Image (spheres, helix red, strand yellow):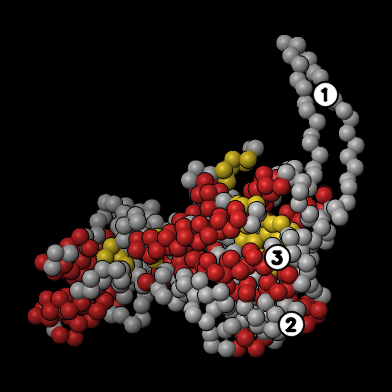
Amino acid sequence: MIKNIKWLLIASISLVACNKDDETVVIEPEVPVVAGSANFSKYVALGNSLTAGFSDSALFREGQKGSYTNILATQFKLVGGGAFKIPFMNDNVGGLLFGGNPNPAFGPRFSVNAVINNNPIIGSIVGGISTTEVFNPAISAAGPYNNMGVPGAKSFHLLAPGYGSPAGLGTNPPTANPYFVRFASSATTSVLADAMAQTPTFFSLWIGNNDVLGYALSGGDGSNPITPSAGAPGVGFDATYTALVTTLTSAGAKGVIGNIPYVTTIPNFTTVPYNPITSSLLGGGNTTVGDGTIDALNTSLYGPLKQVLTALSAGDRINLLSKTVANPLLISDESLPNLSVQITTAFTPTLGAATAGAFGAIYGQARQATKNDLVLLATRGVIGSSNPLAPASINKFGISFPLRDKDILVPTEVAELKTATDAFNVTIKSLATSKGLAFVDANALLSQVANGGVRFGQYHLSSSFLVGGAFSLDGVHPSPRGYALIANEFMKAINAKYGSTFRPVDLGNYAIQFPKVIGNNNQ
């Protein structure tokens, strides 16, 4: 039973003021906040890092407090919503301890460490080390938790028994997730089972982002496929998502679900230009190359390679480097016909069999990037670095040695991601309709953020890295203000579906970045 909240309203209040033109201004009284037809007394949130409040490449206490789900829960309390328990990390450093030892795969949060020549230098030195132990039975004993967001989870992981098993962290590949190991009720339970054990009256489900994002963040190199293996619970996305929603609504709970944004709407894939290489004469680029280096590369590499490729009717793959305009990155594109044999044959008379063979292997599927390629944010630190396995004359990634598959998304991979996202979103919208749930078009919202931005009062949010305000320093997860924007969108959908009257939170109350030190980083 939802508690009735009495509102003290003075009927027909109006504030009358006279300006110099004796105009009358009438301010209407605010509509009281009501629940509508939904029951928010037991709210449970399921999802991945976005639900948990992950930000700046880590999970930490202040980020968890600022999650969109915690913002929602705070508003739900105005209409009888109950406590919203969060499996809080121990500190504001981020990262995890495995048996008392820091695990480098789960490091501290990012921060802006310095600004050099107007370029922010981002690192993960925030002061102190993580004090959050994965294997802490006191945390799971303190459950159950209303925030069931598990960073890194794909849709089928929410169904997987043993996803919180400590033993599962030691298998190859791992079958468990350390964030869920921390707070799972048992070693054999699933995220969905722990959620349903709480008998929720209302739920939020935002899952599926990692189903496509994992593939994108690996550059589509095959190490993180979009389609799960045959042994995964639910197997395909449609069956998995249907099982999740059907179970969550089986006892009459109402809820809100969100769809999956395109990867092209987040700065991780839109920040690093495809053509960052400039000569020292031109300057202003992300990667400056000496003019003598450009001359040498054109003479010894780009020129001969262009000549051979032109003879093979593939001359459009490579052009000479310029000193007057920005130059594109040199990349490997597995969608191209492999010309390794032909290149080896062409270079053998002049370079010898061994060197020609190396050239064929390295440049058989090489080309220069175009505006249709998406360079990963992490690749910025790779460009211009040396490949120790290549000869010194051609060992600079992106300049003389092609960037690897994992460093970049080529158009065929971008198309594959879009096709999967569109298909998954059809399933999500269909289930929202058939189950009578509130629906959040997160894809449309983040597309708007990426294309022109969103204005809220005096604030403007965009997806521009560091300065846009919507995303954190990892280029994937929202900033505090970005999470508030998402919470408002969820409330808008809930209001539209259930007749609730939640008011949007003021984005001005939420920062666009966390400071390097939050308290003492251990509070």
Provide the residue designation for mark 3: 250
Is residue 303 placed above or below 285 in the rendered structure?
Answer: below
Nearer the observer, 445 or 138 = 445
- At a point 60% along the width and 88% down the height, the residue shown is 170
Provide the residue designation for mark 2: 186
Figure quadrant of residue 99: bottom right
Nearer the observer, 378 or 26 = 26
Nearer the observer, 143 or 316 = 143
| Residue type, label 2 | Ser
| Residue type, label 1 | Ser
- At a point 82% along the width and 23% down the height, the residue shown is 15
Numbered circle sitting on residue 14? 1
- At a point 58% along the width and 66% down the height, the residue shown is 241
Numbered circle sitting on residue 369? none
| Residue type, label 3 | Ser
Q: Marks 3/2: CA distance? A: 23 Å
Q: Marks 1/3: CA distance? A: 47 Å
Figure quadrant of residue 302: bottom left
Task: Give the mark toward the camera: 1 or 2.
Answer: 2
Specify which label sits upstream in the sequence, 1 or 3.
Answer: 1
- At a point 61% along the width and 69% down the height, the residue shown is 243
Could you tell me if the residues under marks 3 and 2 are in contact, i.e. CB atoms within 8 Å?
Answer: no
